[in-house]
Amino acid sequence: MERLLFEFVLRATLIAVVAGVALWALRIRSASARHAVWASVMLAMLVLPEWMLWGPKARLAVLTARQAAVTSTVIGGATPRAIIHPVQTSAPAPARRRRWRGDDLFATIYLLGAAVLLLRLAIGTIRANGLTSRAVSAPVTVGLLRPRIILPESSRDWTQNQLNAVMVHEREHVRRRDPLFRCLALLNRALFWFNPVAWWLELKISALAEEACDAAVIEHGHDPREYSLFLLEMARAVVRSGTRVNVAVVAMAMPGSYLSRRIRTIVSGARAPRISRTRAICAALVVAIPSALVASGTLDRARPMLPALPIRAQAIPLPPVLLAQAQTGAAAPTPAPTPEFEVASVRPSNPDQSYLNSATPSLRVGGDQYLRFVQITLRDLIMLAYGIGSGQVQGPGFLRGSPDNPADRFDIAAKVPEGATPEQVPLMLRALLAERFHLSFHRQNKPMDVYALEVAKAGPKMKDSREDATGAAHCARSVAEREQLTLTATCSRMTAADVAQQVQALAPGYFRDGPVVDLTGLKGTYDFTLEWITAGQANQGAPGPSMFEAVQEQLGLKLERRKQTVEIMVIDKLDRTPTEN
Protein backbone atom coordinates (compact mmCIF):
# COMPACT_ATOMS: atom_id res chain seq x y z
CA MET A 1 0.00 0.00 0.00
CA GLU A 2 2.84 2.37 0.74
CA ARG A 3 3.94 2.09 -2.90
CA LEU A 4 0.46 3.07 -4.11
CA LEU A 5 0.36 6.07 -1.73
CA PHE A 6 3.82 7.21 -2.82
CA GLU A 7 2.88 6.90 -6.49
CA PHE A 8 -0.33 8.87 -5.90
CA VAL A 9 1.50 11.68 -4.07
CA LEU A 10 4.08 11.88 -6.86
CA ARG A 11 1.50 11.99 -9.65
CA ALA A 12 -0.73 14.52 -7.85
CA THR A 13 2.28 16.75 -7.15
CA LEU A 14 3.34 16.62 -10.81
CA ILE A 15 -0.17 17.59 -11.94
CA ALA A 16 -0.14 20.55 -9.54
CA VAL A 17 3.31 21.61 -10.77
CA VAL A 18 2.11 21.43 -14.39
CA ALA A 19 -0.87 23.65 -13.51
CA GLY A 20 1.32 26.15 -11.69
CA VAL A 21 3.80 26.37 -14.56
CA ALA A 22 0.95 26.86 -17.06
CA LEU A 23 -0.53 29.73 -15.03
CA TRP A 24 2.88 31.38 -14.78
CA ALA A 25 3.81 30.88 -18.43
CA LEU A 26 0.49 32.25 -19.73
CA ARG A 27 0.57 35.18 -17.29
CA ILE A 28 -2.94 34.50 -16.01
CA ARG A 29 -3.77 36.89 -13.16
CA SER A 30 -7.56 36.65 -12.98
CA ALA A 31 -8.66 35.14 -9.65
CA SER A 32 -11.64 33.52 -11.34
CA ALA A 33 -9.47 31.83 -13.99
CA ARG A 34 -6.90 30.65 -11.46
CA HIS A 35 -9.70 29.32 -9.25
CA ALA A 36 -11.00 27.28 -12.20
CA VAL A 37 -7.54 25.80 -12.84
CA TRP A 38 -6.88 24.82 -9.23
CA ALA A 39 -10.41 23.45 -8.84
CA SER A 40 -9.70 21.26 -11.88
CA VAL A 41 -6.51 20.02 -10.24
CA MET A 42 -8.48 19.19 -7.09
CA LEU A 43 -11.07 17.24 -9.11
CA ALA A 44 -8.24 15.42 -10.89
CA MET A 45 -6.87 14.35 -7.50
CA LEU A 46 -10.27 12.91 -6.54
CA VAL A 47 -10.40 10.68 -9.64
CA LEU A 48 -6.67 9.92 -9.81
CA PRO A 49 -6.72 6.76 -7.60
CA GLU A 50 -9.55 5.24 -9.66
CA TRP A 51 -7.68 6.12 -12.85
CA MET A 52 -4.46 4.56 -11.53
CA LEU A 53 -6.24 1.30 -10.70
CA TRP A 54 -8.78 0.87 -13.49
CA GLY A 55 -8.22 3.61 -16.07
CA PRO A 56 -6.46 3.13 -19.41
CA LYS A 57 -2.67 3.09 -19.23
CA ALA A 58 -0.14 4.61 -21.60
CA ARG A 59 2.75 2.23 -21.15
CA LEU A 60 6.27 3.16 -22.21
CA ALA A 61 8.56 0.16 -22.53
CA VAL A 62 12.12 0.88 -21.42
CA LEU A 63 14.90 -1.54 -22.32
CA THR A 64 17.48 -2.23 -19.69
CA ALA A 65 21.14 -2.33 -20.66
CA ARG A 66 21.20 -6.10 -20.54
CA GLN A 67 18.11 -6.48 -22.70
CA ALA A 68 19.54 -4.10 -25.29
CA ALA A 69 22.70 -6.26 -25.47
CA VAL A 70 20.92 -9.48 -26.36
CA THR A 71 21.65 -10.47 -29.98
CA SER A 72 18.94 -10.64 -32.61
CA THR A 73 19.11 -14.43 -32.72
CA VAL A 74 18.12 -14.88 -29.08
CA ILE A 75 14.82 -13.84 -27.51
CA GLY A 76 15.52 -13.09 -23.89
CA GLY A 77 17.06 -16.36 -22.75
CA ALA A 78 13.82 -17.74 -21.37
CA THR A 79 14.09 -19.49 -18.08
CA PRO A 80 11.18 -21.74 -17.03
CA ARG A 81 9.69 -20.57 -13.79
CA ALA A 82 6.33 -22.22 -13.41
CA ILE A 83 6.00 -25.73 -14.89
CA ILE A 84 2.70 -27.62 -14.62
CA HIS A 85 2.93 -31.05 -13.02
CA PRO A 86 -0.25 -33.21 -13.01
CA VAL A 87 -0.74 -34.58 -9.50
CA GLN A 88 -3.53 -36.21 -7.56
CA THR A 89 -5.90 -33.98 -5.62
CA SER A 90 -4.78 -33.61 -2.04
CA ALA A 91 -6.34 -32.05 1.02
CA PRO A 92 -5.91 -28.27 1.17
CA ALA A 93 -3.11 -26.93 3.31
CA PRO A 94 -4.20 -25.79 6.78
CA ALA A 95 -4.98 -22.11 7.05
CA ARG A 96 -2.05 -20.03 8.22
CA ARG A 97 -2.39 -17.24 10.70
CA ARG A 98 -1.97 -13.94 8.93
CA ARG A 99 0.97 -11.87 10.09
CA TRP A 100 0.82 -8.21 10.94
CA ARG A 101 2.71 -6.53 8.11
CA GLY A 102 3.82 -3.07 7.13
CA ASP A 103 0.87 -2.72 4.74
CA ASP A 104 -1.51 -3.25 7.66
CA LEU A 105 0.12 -0.45 9.66
CA PHE A 106 -0.04 1.97 6.70
CA ALA A 107 -3.68 1.08 6.08
CA THR A 108 -4.60 1.56 9.73
CA ILE A 109 -2.91 4.97 9.98
CA TYR A 110 -4.50 6.12 6.72
CA LEU A 111 -8.01 4.98 7.71
CA LEU A 112 -7.77 6.65 11.12
CA GLY A 113 -6.72 9.99 9.63
CA ALA A 114 -9.37 9.85 6.90
CA ALA A 115 -12.09 8.84 9.38
CA VAL A 116 -11.37 11.80 11.68
CA LEU A 117 -11.46 14.36 8.86
CA LEU A 118 -14.52 12.82 7.19
CA LEU A 119 -16.38 12.85 10.52
CA ARG A 120 -15.47 16.49 10.98
CA LEU A 121 -16.70 17.24 7.47
CA ALA A 122 -20.03 15.48 8.09
CA ILE A 123 -20.63 17.27 11.39
CA GLY A 124 -19.79 20.63 9.84
CA THR A 125 -22.19 19.97 6.94
CA ILE A 126 -25.04 19.16 9.31
CA ARG A 127 -24.37 22.22 11.48
CA ALA A 128 -24.14 24.50 8.44
CA ASN A 129 -27.58 23.40 7.22
CA GLY A 130 -29.09 24.55 10.53
CA LEU A 131 -27.42 27.96 10.71
CA THR A 132 -29.45 31.08 11.49
CA SER A 133 -28.65 34.77 11.73
CA ARG A 134 -28.00 34.46 15.45
CA ALA A 135 -25.29 31.84 14.89
CA VAL A 136 -23.10 33.91 12.56
CA SER A 137 -21.15 37.11 13.04
CA ALA A 138 -20.39 37.66 9.33
CA PRO A 139 -22.31 37.02 6.10
CA VAL A 140 -22.07 33.41 4.90
CA THR A 141 -23.29 31.39 1.92
CA VAL A 142 -24.17 27.78 2.74
CA GLY A 143 -25.67 24.86 0.84
CA LEU A 144 -24.22 22.55 -1.79
CA LEU A 145 -27.02 22.21 -4.34
CA ARG A 146 -29.27 25.08 -3.24
CA PRO A 147 -27.01 27.76 -1.73
CA ARG A 148 -28.57 30.33 0.61
CA ILE A 149 -27.20 33.57 2.03
CA ILE A 150 -27.31 34.16 5.80
CA LEU A 151 -26.74 37.69 7.16
CA PRO A 152 -25.87 38.38 10.82
CA GLU A 153 -28.30 40.27 13.04
CA SER A 154 -25.93 43.25 12.93
CA SER A 155 -26.79 43.70 9.25
CA ARG A 156 -29.78 45.82 10.35
CA ASP A 157 -27.32 48.60 11.19
CA TRP A 158 -25.55 48.54 7.82
CA THR A 159 -25.97 51.31 5.30
CA GLN A 160 -27.67 50.51 2.02
CA ASN A 161 -24.35 50.75 0.21
CA GLN A 162 -22.75 48.26 2.59
CA LEU A 163 -25.68 45.87 2.25
CA ASN A 164 -25.49 46.08 -1.53
CA ALA A 165 -21.76 45.28 -1.50
CA VAL A 166 -22.33 42.25 0.73
CA MET A 167 -25.16 40.93 -1.44
CA VAL A 168 -23.06 41.30 -4.61
CA HIS A 169 -20.24 39.36 -2.93
CA GLU A 170 -22.45 36.55 -1.62
CA ARG A 171 -24.54 36.25 -4.80
CA GLU A 172 -21.28 35.82 -6.71
CA HIS A 173 -20.49 32.88 -4.40
CA VAL A 174 -23.91 31.42 -5.27
CA ARG A 175 -23.42 31.91 -9.01
CA ARG A 176 -19.96 30.31 -8.94
CA ARG A 177 -21.08 27.36 -6.76
CA ASP A 178 -18.24 28.15 -4.38
CA PRO A 179 -19.73 26.23 -1.38
CA LEU A 180 -19.81 23.06 -3.50
CA PHE A 181 -16.19 23.45 -4.59
CA ARG A 182 -15.24 24.26 -0.99
CA CYS A 183 -16.87 21.02 0.17
CA LEU A 184 -15.13 19.00 -2.54
CA ALA A 185 -11.79 20.55 -1.58
CA LEU A 186 -12.37 19.54 2.05
CA LEU A 187 -13.40 16.04 0.94
CA ASN A 188 -10.20 15.83 -1.12
CA ARG A 189 -8.20 16.93 1.93
CA ALA A 190 -9.92 14.33 4.14
CA LEU A 191 -9.35 11.44 1.73
CA PHE A 192 -5.77 12.40 0.90
CA TRP A 193 -4.71 13.99 4.18
CA PHE A 194 -1.23 12.50 3.81
CA ASN A 195 -0.58 14.65 0.72
CA PRO A 196 0.44 18.28 1.42
CA VAL A 197 -0.92 19.26 -2.00
CA ALA A 198 -4.47 18.48 -0.83
CA TRP A 199 -4.14 20.86 2.17
CA TRP A 200 -2.62 23.60 0.03
CA LEU A 201 -5.37 23.27 -2.61
CA GLU A 202 -8.12 23.64 -0.01
CA LEU A 203 -6.66 26.95 1.20
CA LYS A 204 -5.86 28.19 -2.31
CA ILE A 205 -9.33 27.48 -3.70
CA SER A 206 -10.98 29.25 -0.76
CA ALA A 207 -8.75 32.32 -1.05
CA LEU A 208 -9.23 32.62 -4.82
CA ALA A 209 -13.00 32.35 -4.45
CA GLU A 210 -13.00 35.32 -2.06
CA GLU A 211 -10.73 37.33 -4.38
CA ALA A 212 -13.01 36.61 -7.35
CA CYS A 213 -16.07 37.79 -5.41
CA ASP A 214 -14.22 40.92 -4.23
CA ALA A 215 -13.41 41.68 -7.86
CA ALA A 216 -17.12 41.37 -8.72
CA VAL A 217 -17.96 43.91 -5.98
CA ILE A 218 -15.47 46.44 -7.38
CA GLU A 219 -16.71 45.84 -10.94
CA HIS A 220 -20.22 46.77 -9.77
CA GLY A 221 -18.94 50.28 -8.97
CA HIS A 222 -18.40 50.12 -5.20
CA ASP A 223 -15.61 52.26 -3.78
CA PRO A 224 -12.53 50.09 -3.03
CA ARG A 225 -11.56 52.10 0.08
CA GLU A 226 -15.04 52.00 1.63
CA TYR A 227 -15.38 48.28 0.86
CA SER A 228 -11.99 47.56 2.49
CA LEU A 229 -12.96 49.51 5.63
CA PHE A 230 -16.22 47.58 5.78
CA LEU A 231 -14.31 44.26 5.60
CA LEU A 232 -12.12 45.38 8.52
CA GLU A 233 -15.21 46.37 10.51
CA MET A 234 -16.76 42.94 10.00
CA ALA A 235 -13.49 41.29 11.01
CA ARG A 236 -13.52 43.25 14.29
CA ALA A 237 -17.15 42.19 14.87
CA VAL A 238 -16.13 38.56 14.52
CA VAL A 239 -13.33 39.05 17.05
CA ARG A 240 -15.65 40.84 19.51
CA SER A 241 -18.33 38.14 19.33
CA GLY A 242 -15.86 35.48 20.45
CA THR A 243 -18.29 32.74 19.35
CA ARG A 244 -17.65 32.36 15.68
CA VAL A 245 -19.38 29.18 14.45
CA ASN A 246 -17.26 26.76 12.47
CA VAL A 247 -19.15 26.99 9.22
CA ALA A 248 -16.10 26.87 6.99
CA VAL A 249 -16.89 23.30 6.02
CA VAL A 250 -19.56 24.13 3.47
CA ALA A 251 -19.76 27.94 3.64
CA MET A 252 -18.08 30.91 2.04
CA ALA A 253 -17.94 33.70 4.61
CA MET A 254 -17.01 37.38 4.72
CA PRO A 255 -14.51 38.60 5.63
CA GLY A 256 -12.95 35.15 5.14
CA SER A 257 -9.35 34.11 5.09
CA TYR A 258 -6.33 35.99 3.71
CA LEU A 259 -8.03 39.26 4.70
CA SER A 260 -4.88 41.36 4.66
CA ARG A 261 -3.98 40.17 1.17
CA ARG A 262 -7.52 40.79 -0.05
CA ILE A 263 -7.50 44.33 1.28
CA ARG A 264 -4.14 45.10 -0.33
CA THR A 265 -5.46 43.83 -3.66
CA ILE A 266 -8.67 45.87 -3.34
CA VAL A 267 -6.97 49.12 -2.27
CA SER A 268 -4.26 48.88 -4.93
CA GLY A 269 -6.97 49.18 -7.56
CA ALA A 270 -5.09 46.73 -9.81
CA ARG A 271 -7.59 44.76 -11.82
CA ALA A 272 -6.58 41.55 -13.54
CA PRO A 273 -7.37 41.78 -17.27
CA ARG A 274 -10.02 39.41 -18.56
CA ILE A 275 -8.45 36.54 -20.46
CA SER A 276 -9.51 35.90 -24.03
CA ARG A 277 -11.18 32.70 -25.12
CA THR A 278 -8.00 31.70 -26.98
CA ARG A 279 -5.85 32.03 -23.87
CA ALA A 280 -8.45 30.14 -21.83
CA ILE A 281 -8.43 27.25 -24.31
CA CYS A 282 -4.62 27.25 -24.40
CA ALA A 283 -4.48 27.18 -20.60
CA ALA A 284 -6.94 24.29 -20.50
CA LEU A 285 -4.94 22.28 -23.05
CA VAL A 286 -1.58 23.06 -21.45
CA VAL A 287 -2.91 21.77 -18.12
CA ALA A 288 -5.09 18.89 -19.38
CA ILE A 289 -2.70 17.15 -21.78
CA PRO A 290 0.35 16.82 -19.48
CA SER A 291 -1.96 15.98 -16.55
CA ALA A 292 -3.55 13.15 -18.52
CA LEU A 293 -0.10 11.82 -19.42
CA VAL A 294 1.02 12.01 -15.79
CA ALA A 295 -2.15 10.24 -14.65
CA SER A 296 -2.09 7.44 -17.21
CA GLY A 297 1.58 7.07 -18.10
CA THR A 298 3.56 4.21 -16.64
CA LEU A 299 7.09 2.98 -17.29
CA ASP A 300 7.60 -0.73 -17.80
CA ARG A 301 10.77 -2.63 -18.37
CA ALA A 302 10.41 -4.07 -21.83
CA ARG A 303 10.18 -7.83 -21.73
CA PRO A 304 12.11 -9.75 -24.37
CA MET A 305 8.89 -11.58 -25.26
CA LEU A 306 5.41 -11.42 -23.78
CA PRO A 307 4.73 -14.55 -21.70
CA ALA A 308 2.06 -16.98 -22.83
CA LEU A 309 3.17 -20.40 -21.64
CA PRO A 310 4.43 -21.44 -18.19
CA ILE A 311 7.94 -20.22 -18.98
CA ARG A 312 9.23 -16.81 -18.05
CA ALA A 313 11.31 -14.98 -20.63
CA GLN A 314 14.36 -13.34 -19.09
CA ALA A 315 17.52 -11.89 -20.54
CA ILE A 316 20.64 -14.08 -20.35
CA PRO A 317 23.35 -12.06 -18.57
CA LEU A 318 26.37 -11.56 -20.81
CA PRO A 319 29.77 -12.34 -19.33
CA PRO A 320 31.65 -9.24 -18.10
CA VAL A 321 34.59 -7.88 -20.10
CA LEU A 322 37.42 -6.34 -18.12
CA LEU A 323 38.37 -2.80 -19.15
CA ALA A 324 42.03 -3.77 -19.31
CA GLN A 325 41.20 -6.54 -21.78
CA ALA A 326 39.18 -4.17 -23.95
CA GLN A 327 42.05 -1.70 -24.04
CA THR A 328 44.81 -4.21 -24.71
CA GLY A 329 42.84 -6.39 -27.12
CA ALA A 330 43.02 -9.43 -24.85
CA ALA A 331 40.49 -12.17 -25.50
CA ALA A 332 37.27 -11.98 -23.51
CA PRO A 333 36.46 -14.80 -21.09
CA THR A 334 34.86 -17.80 -22.76
CA PRO A 335 31.10 -17.80 -22.09
CA ALA A 336 29.56 -20.75 -20.31
CA PRO A 337 28.49 -23.49 -22.76
CA THR A 338 24.82 -23.70 -23.70
CA PRO A 339 23.13 -26.64 -21.93
CA GLU A 340 22.42 -29.54 -24.29
CA PHE A 341 20.69 -32.90 -24.13
CA GLU A 342 22.98 -35.91 -23.71
CA VAL A 343 21.25 -37.59 -26.63
CA ALA A 344 18.17 -36.67 -28.66
CA SER A 345 16.07 -38.62 -31.16
CA VAL A 346 13.90 -36.58 -33.57
CA ARG A 347 11.73 -38.58 -36.00
CA PRO A 348 8.70 -37.75 -38.17
CA SER A 349 5.54 -38.95 -36.44
CA ASN A 350 3.64 -42.04 -37.47
CA PRO A 351 0.42 -40.81 -39.17
CA ASP A 352 -1.54 -43.64 -37.49
CA GLN A 353 -0.77 -42.31 -34.01
CA SER A 354 -3.17 -40.01 -32.18
CA TYR A 355 -2.24 -36.39 -31.54
CA LEU A 356 -1.15 -36.93 -27.97
CA ASN A 357 0.53 -33.54 -27.60
CA SER A 358 -1.80 -31.45 -29.75
CA ALA A 359 -3.44 -29.67 -26.81
CA THR A 360 -0.97 -28.71 -24.07
CA PRO A 361 2.56 -30.06 -24.47
CA SER A 362 4.64 -29.49 -21.35
CA LEU A 363 8.27 -29.61 -20.27
CA ARG A 364 7.78 -32.35 -17.72
CA VAL A 365 10.79 -34.69 -17.53
CA GLY A 366 10.09 -38.34 -16.79
CA GLY A 367 11.64 -40.40 -14.03
CA ASP A 368 14.13 -41.85 -16.49
CA GLN A 369 15.45 -38.31 -17.18
CA TYR A 370 13.89 -38.28 -20.65
CA LEU A 371 11.81 -35.44 -22.11
CA ARG A 372 9.30 -36.93 -24.56
CA PHE A 373 6.94 -35.45 -27.14
CA VAL A 374 4.58 -37.31 -29.48
CA GLN A 375 3.05 -35.67 -32.57
CA ILE A 376 4.40 -32.24 -31.60
CA THR A 377 4.65 -29.39 -34.09
CA LEU A 378 7.62 -27.11 -34.57
CA ARG A 379 5.48 -24.18 -33.46
CA ASP A 380 4.81 -25.87 -30.11
CA LEU A 381 8.50 -26.64 -29.71
CA ILE A 382 9.41 -22.99 -30.31
CA MET A 383 6.71 -21.80 -27.89
CA LEU A 384 8.07 -24.08 -25.16
CA ALA A 385 11.68 -23.15 -25.83
CA TYR A 386 11.15 -19.37 -25.81
CA GLY A 387 8.14 -18.97 -23.53
CA ILE A 388 5.89 -17.22 -26.04
CA GLY A 389 2.32 -17.60 -27.28
CA SER A 390 1.15 -19.04 -30.58
CA GLY A 391 0.30 -15.61 -31.93
CA GLN A 392 3.87 -14.49 -31.36
CA VAL A 393 5.44 -16.98 -33.80
CA GLN A 394 5.43 -15.87 -37.45
CA GLY A 395 6.83 -18.26 -40.02
CA PRO A 396 6.09 -20.84 -42.71
CA GLY A 397 2.81 -22.76 -42.75
CA PHE A 398 4.41 -26.10 -41.89
CA LEU A 399 5.07 -24.80 -38.37
CA ARG A 400 1.56 -25.80 -37.33
CA GLY A 401 1.52 -29.31 -38.82
CA SER A 402 -1.66 -31.07 -39.91
CA PRO A 403 -3.07 -34.58 -40.43
CA ASP A 404 -2.53 -34.05 -44.18
CA ASN A 405 1.21 -33.54 -43.59
CA PRO A 406 2.18 -36.02 -40.84
CA ALA A 407 5.84 -35.39 -41.58
CA ASP A 408 5.41 -31.89 -40.09
CA ARG A 409 4.88 -33.43 -36.64
CA PHE A 410 7.64 -35.13 -34.71
CA ASP A 411 8.24 -37.73 -32.03
CA ILE A 412 11.09 -36.56 -29.80
CA ALA A 413 12.91 -38.31 -26.98
CA ALA A 414 15.77 -36.37 -25.39
CA LYS A 415 17.77 -37.31 -22.31
CA VAL A 416 18.38 -34.55 -19.79
CA PRO A 417 21.85 -34.67 -18.18
CA GLU A 418 21.86 -35.76 -14.56
CA GLY A 419 21.89 -32.78 -12.20
CA ALA A 420 20.37 -30.38 -14.74
CA THR A 421 17.84 -27.92 -13.36
CA PRO A 422 14.32 -27.41 -14.79
CA GLU A 423 15.40 -23.92 -15.79
CA GLN A 424 17.92 -25.40 -18.23
CA VAL A 425 15.43 -27.56 -20.16
CA PRO A 426 14.14 -24.74 -22.44
CA LEU A 427 17.75 -23.78 -23.20
CA MET A 428 18.38 -27.38 -24.28
CA LEU A 429 15.34 -27.20 -26.56
CA ARG A 430 16.77 -24.04 -28.12
CA ALA A 431 20.05 -25.78 -28.81
CA LEU A 432 18.14 -28.71 -30.34
CA LEU A 433 16.17 -26.38 -32.65
CA ALA A 434 19.34 -24.59 -33.74
CA GLU A 435 21.34 -27.80 -34.31
CA ARG A 436 18.74 -30.09 -35.89
CA PHE A 437 16.42 -27.57 -37.62
CA HIS A 438 18.89 -24.65 -38.11
CA LEU A 439 16.47 -22.16 -36.57
CA SER A 440 17.32 -18.47 -36.86
CA PHE A 441 15.00 -15.50 -36.42
CA HIS A 442 14.67 -11.84 -35.53
CA ARG A 443 12.33 -9.89 -33.28
CA GLN A 444 9.71 -7.39 -34.35
CA ASN A 445 7.00 -5.32 -32.64
CA LYS A 446 3.50 -5.86 -33.95
CA PRO A 447 0.04 -4.67 -32.80
CA MET A 448 -2.24 -7.63 -32.20
CA ASP A 449 -5.26 -8.72 -30.19
CA VAL A 450 -4.34 -9.83 -26.69
CA TYR A 451 -6.13 -10.73 -23.47
CA ALA A 452 -5.12 -8.08 -20.93
CA LEU A 453 -4.97 -9.39 -17.37
CA GLU A 454 -5.92 -6.52 -15.03
CA VAL A 455 -7.09 -5.99 -11.45
CA ALA A 456 -10.88 -6.22 -11.12
CA LYS A 457 -12.87 -3.46 -9.46
CA ALA A 458 -13.11 -5.29 -6.12
CA GLY A 459 -9.32 -5.83 -5.98
CA PRO A 460 -7.23 -9.04 -6.01
CA LYS A 461 -8.41 -12.01 -3.94
CA MET A 462 -5.19 -14.03 -4.04
CA LYS A 463 -3.31 -14.72 -0.81
CA ASP A 464 0.14 -13.27 -0.33
CA SER A 465 2.82 -15.96 -0.23
CA ARG A 466 4.51 -16.47 3.10
CA GLU A 467 7.62 -14.37 3.56
CA ASP A 468 9.63 -17.44 4.56
CA ALA A 469 8.41 -19.53 1.60
CA THR A 470 11.22 -21.06 -0.45
CA GLY A 471 11.45 -22.90 -3.74
CA ALA A 472 10.39 -22.12 -7.28
CA ALA A 473 6.94 -21.05 -8.39
CA HIS A 474 4.73 -24.09 -8.89
CA CYS A 475 1.28 -25.02 -10.23
CA ALA A 476 -0.27 -28.47 -9.75
CA ARG A 477 -3.30 -29.41 -11.86
CA SER A 478 -5.89 -32.11 -11.22
CA VAL A 479 -9.57 -32.96 -11.67
CA ALA A 480 -11.80 -31.85 -8.81
CA GLU A 481 -13.30 -34.74 -6.84
CA ARG A 482 -16.77 -33.26 -6.49
CA GLU A 483 -17.27 -32.59 -10.21
CA GLN A 484 -15.46 -34.48 -12.93
CA LEU A 485 -15.95 -31.66 -15.43
CA THR A 486 -14.13 -29.17 -13.23
CA LEU A 487 -10.35 -28.80 -13.41
CA THR A 488 -8.37 -27.48 -10.45
CA ALA A 489 -4.94 -25.87 -10.19
CA THR A 490 -3.22 -25.09 -6.90
CA CYS A 491 -0.47 -22.54 -7.42
CA SER A 492 2.12 -21.09 -5.07
CA ARG A 493 4.71 -18.28 -5.16
CA MET A 494 3.23 -16.81 -8.35
CA THR A 495 4.04 -13.32 -9.56
CA ALA A 496 1.46 -11.47 -11.65
CA ALA A 497 3.43 -12.46 -14.77
CA ASP A 498 3.29 -16.09 -13.63
CA VAL A 499 -0.49 -15.83 -13.23
CA ALA A 500 -0.83 -14.60 -16.83
CA GLN A 501 1.37 -17.46 -18.02
CA GLN A 502 -0.55 -20.07 -16.06
CA VAL A 503 -3.99 -18.85 -17.10
CA GLN A 504 -3.11 -19.44 -20.76
CA ALA A 505 -1.19 -22.65 -20.14
CA LEU A 506 -3.98 -24.17 -18.03
CA ALA A 507 -6.78 -23.36 -20.48
CA PRO A 508 -5.27 -22.86 -23.96
CA GLY A 509 -8.64 -23.39 -25.67
CA TYR A 510 -9.81 -19.97 -24.46
CA PHE A 511 -6.84 -18.09 -25.91
CA ARG A 512 -6.20 -19.49 -29.38
CA ASP A 513 -6.56 -16.04 -30.95
CA GLY A 514 -4.18 -14.10 -28.72
CA PRO A 515 -1.77 -14.30 -25.77
CA VAL A 516 -2.52 -13.32 -22.16
CA VAL A 517 -0.56 -10.21 -21.13
CA ASP A 518 0.04 -9.09 -17.53
CA LEU A 519 -1.12 -5.48 -17.08
CA THR A 520 -2.04 -5.73 -13.38
CA GLY A 521 0.90 -3.78 -11.98
CA LEU A 522 0.99 -6.17 -8.99
CA LYS A 523 4.49 -6.69 -7.54
CA GLY A 524 4.04 -9.40 -4.87
CA THR A 525 3.97 -13.20 -4.99
CA TYR A 526 0.71 -15.04 -4.41
CA ASP A 527 -0.83 -18.42 -3.59
CA PHE A 528 -4.23 -19.38 -5.02
CA THR A 529 -6.48 -22.22 -6.15
CA LEU A 530 -8.32 -21.97 -9.47
CA GLU A 531 -11.26 -24.10 -10.65
CA TRP A 532 -12.67 -23.95 -14.20
CA ILE A 533 -14.06 -25.98 -17.10
CA THR A 534 -12.53 -26.29 -20.55
CA ALA A 535 -13.48 -24.02 -23.44
CA GLY A 536 -15.18 -26.91 -25.23
CA GLN A 537 -17.31 -27.72 -22.18
CA ALA A 538 -18.18 -24.05 -21.72
CA ASN A 539 -19.32 -23.78 -25.36
CA GLN A 540 -21.58 -26.82 -24.83
CA GLY A 541 -23.22 -25.20 -21.79
CA ALA A 542 -21.68 -27.53 -19.21
CA PRO A 543 -22.01 -26.45 -15.56
CA GLY A 544 -19.03 -24.72 -13.99
CA PRO A 545 -17.10 -21.47 -14.35
CA SER A 546 -15.29 -20.61 -17.56
CA MET A 547 -11.69 -19.47 -17.24
CA PHE A 548 -12.82 -15.84 -17.62
CA GLU A 549 -15.36 -16.22 -14.79
CA ALA A 550 -12.90 -18.12 -12.61
CA VAL A 551 -10.19 -15.48 -12.96
CA GLN A 552 -12.58 -12.70 -11.92
CA GLU A 553 -14.52 -14.49 -9.17
CA GLN A 554 -11.67 -16.50 -7.63
CA LEU A 555 -8.58 -14.32 -8.23
CA GLY A 556 -10.11 -10.82 -8.25
CA LEU A 557 -8.62 -10.16 -11.71
CA LYS A 558 -10.22 -9.73 -15.12
CA LEU A 559 -9.40 -10.53 -18.74
CA GLU A 560 -10.23 -7.93 -21.37
CA ARG A 561 -9.77 -8.17 -25.12
CA ARG A 562 -7.76 -5.29 -26.56
CA LYS A 563 -5.14 -4.26 -29.08
CA GLN A 564 -1.57 -4.19 -27.78
CA THR A 565 1.83 -3.88 -29.37
CA VAL A 566 3.77 -7.06 -28.58
CA GLU A 567 7.08 -8.51 -29.60
CA ILE A 568 6.90 -11.41 -32.04
CA MET A 569 9.40 -13.92 -33.38
CA VAL A 570 9.82 -13.77 -37.17
CA ILE A 571 11.40 -16.97 -38.51
CA ASP A 572 14.24 -16.26 -40.95
CA LYS A 573 15.29 -19.85 -41.49
CA LEU A 574 13.89 -23.20 -40.36
CA ASP A 575 14.48 -26.56 -42.02
CA ARG A 576 11.31 -28.58 -42.52
CA THR A 577 13.26 -31.84 -42.18
CA PRO A 578 15.71 -32.23 -39.28
CA THR A 579 19.22 -33.49 -39.65
CA GLU A 580 19.63 -37.21 -39.00
CA ASN A 581 20.02 -38.57 -35.49
Image: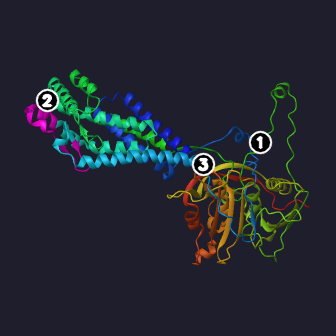
The reply to whether dot 1 and dot 3 touch (C-beta < 8 Å) is: no
Asked where in the image residue 385 lies, by quadrant, the reply is bottom right
- The residue that label 1 is drawn on is 317
Q: Quadrant of the C terminus?
A: bottom right
Which structural element holds mark 2?
loop
Magenta extent: 141-167
Q: Is residue 352 above or below residue 369?
A: below
CA separation, marks 1 and 3? Answer: 34 Å
Alpha-carbon span between mark 1 and mark 2: 76 Å
Amino acid type, callout 3: Arg
The residues tagged by marks 2 and 3 sit, at their Cα atoms, a distance apart of: 63 Å
One can see residue 75 in this view: yes
Q: Position of residue 564 (x, y in %)?
A: 57, 53
Q: Which mark is residue 221?
A: 2
What residue would you read off at disc 3? 101
Q: Earlier in the sequence, mark 2 or mark 3?
A: 3
- Residue 391 numbered tag: none
- Residue type at mark 1 is Pro
Q: Earlier in the sequence, mark 1 or mark 2?
A: 2
Q: Is residue 238 left or right of residue 442?
A: left
Nearer to us of marks 1 and 3 is 3
Position of residue 65 in the picture relative to residue 341 (left or right): left
Mark 2, Cα crowd under 10 Å, few <14 / some 14-19 / many 20+, is few
Position of residue 132 relative to residue 329, above or below, is below
Direction from residue 477 to residue 411 in the image, left or right:
right
Identify the residue shown where x is 37% and y is 41%: 40
Residue 544 sits above or below residue 244 on the image: below
| Residue 205 horizontal/vertical position (percent) | 33, 36
Q: Amino acid at mark 2?
A: Gly
202 on left or right of 564: left
Q: In what element is the residue under mark 3? A: loop
Q: Residue furthest top?
A: 268
